[in-house]
Image (cartoon, rainbow, N blue to C red):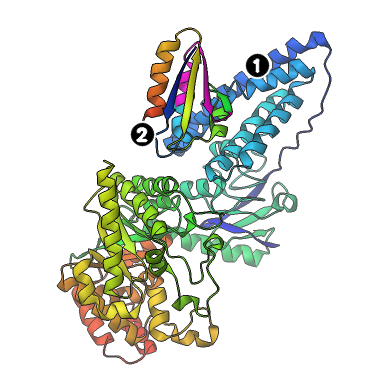
Amino acid sequence: MERTGIAAAPGIAIGRAMVKKEENMEIVRRSLEPNQVSLEVERFKDCVQQAILELAELKEITEKKVGEEEAKIFEAQQLFLQDPEFVGAIENMIEAEHINAEAATQSVRDQFLAIFESMENEYMRERAADLRDVSQRILRHLLGITQNETAVVDGPQILVVHDLTPSDTAKLDLSITRGFATDIGGRTSHSAIMARTMGIPAVVGLSNVTEEVSDGDMIIVDGSTGKIHIRPEPSVLQEYEDKLRDFQLRQETLAKLIHQSTITLDGRHVELAANIGNPSDAEAAISHGAEAIGLFRTEFLYMGRKDFPSEDEQFESYKSVLETMGNKPVIIRTLDIGGDKELPYLNLPEELNPFLGYRAIRLCLDQIDLFKTQLRALLRASAYGNLRIMYPMIATFAELRKANQILNEVKQELMNQNISCNHKVQVGIMIEVPAAALVADQLAKHVDFFSIGTNDLIQYTMAADRMNPKVSYLYDPFNPSLLRLIQMVITAAHREGKWVGMCGEMAGEELAIPILLGLGLDEFSMGSGSILQARHLIKQLDSRKMAKVAEHVLSLSTGQEIKDYIQQEVMK
Amino acid sequence: MLTKTITIKNPSGLHARPATTFVQKASAYPCNVNLIKGSKKINGKSIMGLMTLAAKQGDELILEVDGPEEEIALDELTKVLEAEHL
């Protein structure tokens, strides 16, 4: 039986299921005799004390097993259990209404949950999960439920749970737990983030997997595709066992490259960076060997909400990525909204050709307040790491000049207000409009770097909608016209002493990397998962030889010829 | 009873880490500690209280302390609230 959920952490895990159903705690409201009340309060206090001790223990375990940052969650949970408004309210309720501690705990918890969940702030919603976790812990003690933590199956296990709470995660026995599958959760839920941090394959959001699986069932978790196989056929099992072995061999080879720099056979260093869309992705980028963040898309801050994010909210996000990356460079792209990414609260009229319309820098230069708020947040964050700012969709020098003017105004404002920022922060542009590529020599004089955005550059150069399958034959990064544009851009930048990166999908393509290296690309930015593979490849290439390969490639007349040539000459 | 009006300077406001620090410090004093924002008054020793207060940078709060060691509590807690970074 095959089920598809959300791919939360990559890799394959095969093992026997350990099913942990959501603890079904029946809470019955009981009335107490007046003389029982003080005893009940004492019983409640005892349980809270035990829970606090347990949390201290979990904190210690997590510090050792996962990390100090992850362990802090239990410190916060301890504060909940010492909170007079929470614990005190439960005690008061027991005393005032003469009811049992379980019912009082549940009732006070629900009141706070209602407040937390009504707040439109991700931080508060996460705290709601902590409150639930903590309350469960007290209730378990009150009800005398001992958690069944001993393994019921031997050998490698796949944990199947409704949801993985922070407490569950801390208790995972990594020597036997190979992966997990959950009923609920998304890519950014606590369980998914922890799985990626610990490197355990996981599929989440399978809706009712805890109902479909029994203890001891054979399960395959494919955390890369988001599929799980329950009680698989022997042939499927064999297929995955082979995949797992290949995967492990490959991982072992690649894992050795995590902390190495990316140096070609002839000693040229290029930078391998990660594209991320969320501050929480930064840690995964580092663990996948990223030397930098080559593209941090800021759209997530603006999407899925009713109003613009405040300067402070943006500042916190940018700062957190910069701090996670330490002194490694982080390119943050200013808002790239419009086109296929709409914001309902911007109230933009529908356009006939959104990709050729009012979007990205065009919109920001028109709605200057919106742009300034983001630039202020960026500059304030620049004090906390190695920030580089990048404007998307620049087509003309006039646009670049105006954007830089606004940036300078914002810098001046901050200076007048005595707010610290890095005044020498690098500023670059994305090259994704052919017009910009054609005047790259002029633009290069006014930027610190270029980053070639191939996804849009291909579409605009070929006049082919990347969503339209009928013209997908045109949407090919190996088109000679595109390679020539890339060459122009790199040459123009290098002539001015500026560096050039690429943050489109092409930068991570095995067949494209040798050509790009030969053309002189300085930075390759891609999805974190592709970095080690790219490093593995680049370390085996000689950049001088690749320069000759690239020269020959530029004389070929079709994309297919180019790919065949690379396949034969380089990848053999 | 002593009171003091304070403007929040921390860019992340008074949740997350600053709130934790405040509650830990406030809990160490024997006096009562309250925070008032507009018409809302919460117990300064309660992490839930601070969270539901949702004070942001620029918000004005009244810090109210009442009981033993109130002077020193007022001074120390003012420092936490006015700190720009914690």
- Residue A439 lies, in percent from the top left, at 25, 79
Residue at image position (74%, 53%) is A212
- What is the magenta range? B22-39
Judging from the image, mark 2 belongs to the subunit labelled B
Q: Is residue A293 left or right of residue A142?
A: left
| Side of A388 relative to B43 (left or right) | left
Mark 2 closeness class: few <14, some 14–19, many ≥20 residues within 10 Å: few
Q: CA distance from mark 1 to mark 2?
A: 37 Å
State the residue in front, A378 or A318.
A378
Amino acid tagged 1: Asp
Q: What amino acid type is highlighted by mark number 2?
A: His
Query: Is A335 colored magenta in this rendering?
Result: no
Please tell me how many numbered marks the rendered image carries: 2
Instruction: Say if the magenta span includes residue B24.
Output: yes
Hey, which quadrant is residue B84 in on the image?
top left
- Residue A417, given in percent of the width and then of the height, sits at 28, 42
Front residue (pair A235, A485) = A485
Residue drawn at x 49%, y 15% as measured from the top left: B65
- Residue found at x 46% / y 25%: B22
Q: Which residue is mark 2?
A: B85
Within 10 Å of disc 1 (Cα), the crowding (few <14, some 14-19, many 20+) is some
Nearer to us in this view, A24 or A309: A309
Under tag 2, what secondary structure? loop
